[in-house]
Amino acid sequence: MGVIHLPARHRSHRWLVACLIGLVVIGAWLGRALLFESWTLASLPAFWWSGSDRFLLSAAGSDFDVSFANYSTTQTSAAPFDDRVPPILHHVAMGGAGAARQIEQWKEVRQSCLDIHPGWEAHIWTDEKANAFVAEQFPELREMWDGYKFPIQRIDALRYMVLYHYGGVILDMDLQCRRALGPLRRFDFVAPAAHPTGFSVGFMMASQRNPFVGALVRNLRPYNRAWLGLPYPTVMFSTGCHYASTIHAYQPNRTTLKVLAGPPDNFRLHSLNGHVQTPIFNHLGSSSWHSYDAALIVSVGRMLGHKLPILAVVAGVVVFVVVRRTKRRRAVRV
């Protein structure tokens, strides 16, 4: 039997396919960082709950009363446990002229936290103070920090930098303290659970130079993107709760990175969404930075959540049909 020669059109088609595959591979390699970051953000709902019995605070897993009923309202130390979190309170009030209004508006609310933690060091981070701090302690991030499009991004990033450098407690200006935070100082890191996954960054406690908080600072640069070109995902995925929760989910050991939630029958006991009262706070404000696209993102997420299996099947069928037709075109009849 002689050698079979493919028609010229089939040879050119084969080279075209090879070139396209090559371009896809090159593009994937060049954009591997973006692909990785996108994957980690998108997969958070699937990976967040892995090993949650170790990082969720509970009576069984951590010997901790999440209702706080068994702790004094004025307990400022973790005794008889060691205090891993230093006694420092941090509040952030940035936004130019608006910062002064924030400080005045929430003056009594902030004072409630200072009063119930007598003798603790306290900082209020204004624009001027924050600028000087970032320039001195994190000069390699200063240009990026100045270039953030949304003010809340600078606030979020500052939370991580301040918490890493000093340790202590980060509190939103609109959090009124109902009791002292001493019982939680025995843990290296604590933040309240968010709904439906992850944790909130409006309240965090951490030891000084905490490795996880350091990871939050280090990853600010690679995740600094205009995600989907919309304000809400850009903030949430670059500096906000979703970003911080994603870094948490990919830590090799999450045991010491405690998330404060309620019991199974009242899991949202410590949630800080909206105007709510929790065992330790009155949350008096709301997430005013959320833009018009928040509802769109939530609705799209819900839609995809129900249709992902269908979309996966459809995509599989399309790939199968394309491959099969390509093979048929390449077939040579002798």
Image (tube, grey):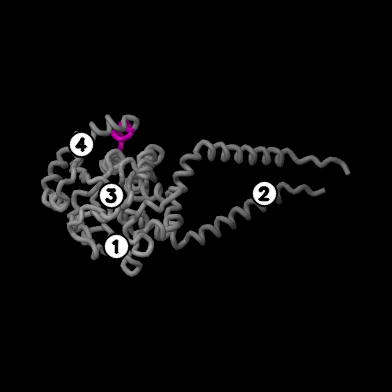
Label 3: element kind: loop
Q: CA distance from mark 3 to mark 1?
A: 18 Å
Residue 26: quarter of image: top right
Question: Which circle's residue, 3 or 1, is located before the other in the chain?
Answer: 1
Which residue is at a point 34% across and 30% down the rendered structure image? 140
Label 4: element kind: helix
| Residue placed under numbered mark 2 in the picture | 326
Percent x, y of residue 113: 16, 51
Label 1: element kind: loop
Percent x, y of residue 31: 49, 38
- Residue 256's place in the image compared with 264, above or below, is above
Percent x, y of residue 266: 31, 67
Question: Which circle's residue, 1 or 2, is located before the other in the chain?
Answer: 1
Q: CA distance from mark 3 to mark 4?
A: 31 Å
Q: CA distance from mark 1 to mark 2?
A: 60 Å
The answer to if 55 sits in the magenta stretch is no
Return the residue nearer the eye: 18 or 330. Answer: 18
Tell me if label 1 and label 2 are in contact, CB under 8 Å. no
Q: CA distance from mark 4 to mark 2?
A: 61 Å
- The residues colored magenta run 141-150
Amino acid type, mark 2: Thr
Tag in front: 1 or 2? 1
| Residue placed under numbered mark 4 in the picture | 127
Amino acid type, mark 1: Val
Question: Which circle's residue, 3 or 4, is located before the other in the chain?
Answer: 3
| Residue placed under numbered mark 1 in the picture | 66
* Label 3 CA crowd tier, 10 Å (few <14, some 14–19, many 20+): some
Tell me if label 3 and label 4 are in contact, CB under 8 Å. no
